[in-house]
Amino acid sequence: MAAVDQLLGPVAQWYFALSTASQIGLLSAGLLVLAVLVNVANQLLFKNPNEPPVVFHLFPIIGSTITYGMDPPRFFVENRNKFGNVFTFVLLGKKTTVFVGPDGNEFILNAKQKDVNAEEIYGVLTTPVFGKDVVYDCPNSKLMEQKRLIKATLTTEAFRQYVPIIEAECYSYFKKNPDFKPDAGVVDIAKKMAQLTIFTASHCLQGKIVRDQFDESLADLYHDLDMGFTPINFMLPWAPLPQNRRRDQARETVAKIYRDTMAARRRSDEKDAQDIMHHLMYATYKNGQPVPEHEIAHIMIALLMAGQHSSSATSTWIMLRLASRPDIVEELYQEQLRVVGAPDTAFAYEHLARLTLHANVIKETLRQHAPIHSIMRKVKQPMHIPGTKFTVPPSHTLMAAPGVSGNDAEFFPEPSEWDPHRWEPESPLAPRLPIKTGDDEEKVDYGYGLISKGASSPYLPFGAGRHRCIGEQFAYLQLQVITACMVRLFKIRTVDGSTRKVPGTDYSSLFSKALEPAEIYWEKREKAA
Ligand code: HEM
């Protein structure tokens, strides 16, 4: 004991007199303080002038994960104001370089395949949910072919069939759902829109046999699949957690349901079906190979999930925005009377292009509430950022955030004002940069059909480049018909009657959703006798 006293002094004596638990606790705290000091010193002393500035953070690995995760758009804007359009932050131990604004959108979303890659970022999360050999569990060239095959099925002929399907689903839903039995009431519209989205999407894209199973087992199975999309699974996708076990079981069961459905459909020899499953059953890859059934099943899961979150989050925001602007609800109703006719006239595909205010409600809602706030790519080679001295090294992830420019006063006057009329050319709030549309624009084909070449637009809710959304037209159609049916059946407003106010945003999943309960007050236009 005397030797210890002499060697280590009274501090050591005090330390070794503590219980083992206290000793471990103290040691850990010491190591943490040391790690923080080294991390801070590293940021202050070893700045690399050729790499983008790094957002200051105390803790290694955690970095800015919490501030980013709580409110990504605010995080982007605050750091843009501090550093300019390009900066790096630490996200779950990864150096992540954000490049906002139209130039950033172009730099990241139109980057070459040799420079960036999406599958190494998203694959860990999506493969356990979708299954093997599709989307990010295959070479990019195969994904481009899968997108081409899917896009080829989304024809005008198919869309013509989808409009009455969605209309009938909406009417049946509002008629049967017990929450809509009285003449008026309050509902959590997020829950209702989630159900309506999956019923309408499954019916249109996967056929009636699949749709009918959503009243029974499929809804719960998809819920289990959904639990695979928690941000923690970016780090621990294969962890033996109960929700991951349920996700894996659900994927197997859903894929089997799809395979059995395909077998039954082949036997029944149906003729004029326009859903994607039917088309893929008879499609072939470029090399002449038919699409294997397990791939079709996995594509079905991927498509339904890709559309579900973004479309149901958007329709919820649409309803919340409309509830905060009953004057716009009435304008929409008048537009329907003008374009479609009396309320008992069925909606048709041809009406949609003329229901311009309906389309602008969607466009404006996507401007303020784009469901995908961050788009990531893994950097494969050093990438120089034009006009700067910065080069992004391959150890970094790149992050695009088109929503930042979509809410920037430089491009959209009074950006926090939700006003669907701003999309009319003569509006004082009209976007300041021409949003390119039309045939004169340069186009490119990444393997899934021609799309606009430029990504340097401030408004890109559907992304750009080789990973651009192929569901945009379907999403617009689905959102337009759901909105039109809602407006035709109900008058809506906020629960307390206030205007221009909506709930905050929940960023805890990977999508920007309305905080729940997202309640609105509704009242039937035609009351029960
Ligand atoms: C890709 C948004 C609906 C299928 C994307 C991307 C965005 C997006 C931003 C690009 C992601 C990236 O670059 O990493 C939206 C929004 C929607 C919507 C806002 C609705 C309001 C749909 C629907 C479907 C769909 C309904 C299916 C029918 C896809 C597919 C991709 C994609 C297959 C391509 C993924 C890739 O190539 O990596 N979507 N989407 N989306 N979306 Fe959508």
Image (cartoon, rainbow, N blue to C red):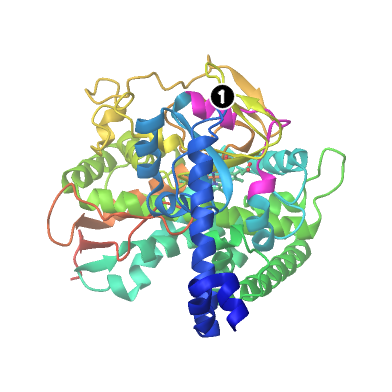
* Left or right position of 460 against 354: right
At horizontal 63% and vertical 57% (from top left) the residue drawn is: 125
Closer to the camera, 300 or 455?
455
Closer to the camera, 316 or 92?
92
Q: How many marks?
A: 1
Placement of the C terminus among the 4 image quadrants:
bottom left
| Disc 1, SS | loop
Query: Magenta residues, as a range?
Result: 103-121
- Residue 214 appears in the figure: no
Residue behind mark 1: 390
Q: Where does the image place residue 264, in percent across and percent down from the top left?
A: 74, 68
| Above-or-below relation of 281 to 47 | below
At horizontal 62% and vertical 52% (from top left) the residue drawn is: 275
Q: Where does the image place residue 337, in percent across and percent down from the top left?
A: 25, 42
At horizontal 73% and vertical 63% (from top left) the residue drawn is: 262
Ligand 1 neighbours mark 1 (CB distance < 8 Å): no
| Above-or-below relation of 289 to 258 | above
* Left or right position of 124 against 523: right
Disc 1 packing (10 Å; few <14; some 14–19; many ≥20): some
Q: Amino acid at mark 1?
A: Phe
Q: Where does the image place residue 446, in percent across and percent down from the top left?
A: 69, 30
Q: Where does the image place residue 180, in percent across and percent down from the top left?
A: 28, 70
Magenta residue check for 430: no
Magenta residue check for 111: yes
